[in-house]
Structure formats: C-alpha cells, structure tokens
Image (cartoon, helix red, strand yellow):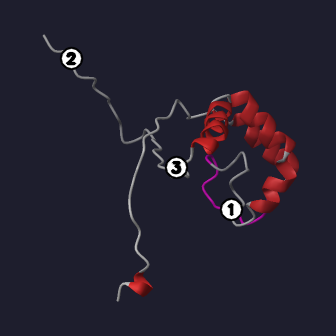
Amino acid sequence: MPAPEKVYFFNSSERGLFVEIYFPKRAAYYGAIFNALRKGHDENLVKRYLQDNVEKLINEFQAFPDLFKPSRYTFPKFSRTLPSVDEALERIEMYKSPFTGWSTYSVDGVWFDESKTR
C-alpha cells in the first residue's frame, strides 16, 4: 500500500516565503554556503548579528525606514523617518525565524549573449 500523501493547509492569512538563490556551481563554495544556511537557522545567532550591526543596517536600509520599526505591523500609516537605534533593537528582539530548512540541487543551463546572436 502506498504511503499517504502529505497535505499542507494554507490560509489566506498565513504567509509563506519561498526563495530560489543561484550560487556558483563549485565545490569550493559549498562549505561557505552550507555554513551560512546553517547559521541562518539559529534565531539567536541572527538576532545577535543584527544587534551588533544595528546602526549599519539602519543606514543601509534607508529606503525602507519601517523595516526596523516595532510599530510596522500595528500602526496603519507608513513612516518615512528612520528608526532610532532603540526602536530597531526592539524590532530585532521581536524577530522570529521563518527559516525551517533548505534543499540544494544542481541546475545546468546556457545563457546567450544577445548582442552576438543577432
């Protein structure tokens, strides 16, 4: 008898994030990629990194001023002012990792230089 199929229930209010990232196909890079993914699974390690780099992150993401504001999901209006370091630290503390795993697979392909094919 075949194993029962897995059924996944999604509601319209549930958010899911599926991302596909292409890395160079070289064994030399695989260890670094694997370690980054493994460390990215550790919620406390991610929070510590964000906390240690909070000022740089506020500066780097100036185009997204609400990103590090704790009121982002509770206040109805978008704000253009950058968050304070304290606000950003409060928002970082709220972080819950959605990262539950990854899979790897090999992709082969060919990309043409359009300027040379015409």
Image depth: mark 3 or mark 1 in front: 3
Against 11, is 76 above or below? below
The boundaries of the magenta stretch are 73-82
Q: Residue furthest bottom?
A: 118
Q: Residue at x 68, y 53 (%)?
A: 67
Asked if residue 113 lies left or right of residue 74, the reply is left
Distance of mark 2 from mark 3, alpha carbons? Answer: 35 Å
Task: Give the dominant element type of the magenta stretch: helix, strand or loop.
Answer: loop
Residue drawn at 86 percent across, 45 percent down: 86
Query: What residue is pinned by disc 2?
Result: 4
Mark 2 closeness class: few <14, some 14–19, many ≥20 residues within 10 Å? few
Q: Is residue 27 above or below residue 7?
A: below
Q: Amino acid at mark 2?
A: Pro
* Farthest-out residue, top: 1
Q: Nearer the viewer, residue 75 or 57?
A: 57
Of labels 1 and 2, the one closer to you: 2
CA separation, marks 1 and 2? 44 Å
> Which residue is under mark 1?
64
> In which quadrant is the N terminus drawn?
top left
- The earlier-in-sequence mark between 2 and 3 is 2
- Name the spot of residue 75 as percent of width and height, x first: 64, 51
11, above or below 65, in the image? above
Residue 97's spot in the image, x, y percent? 61, 33
Q: Which mark is residue 25?
A: 3
* Residues tagged 2 and 3 counted as in contact (Cβ below 8 A): no
Camera-side residue of 7 and 91: 7
Place of residue 48 in the rendered image (x, y in percent of width and height, measured from the top left): 80, 34
Whether residue 83 is visible: no
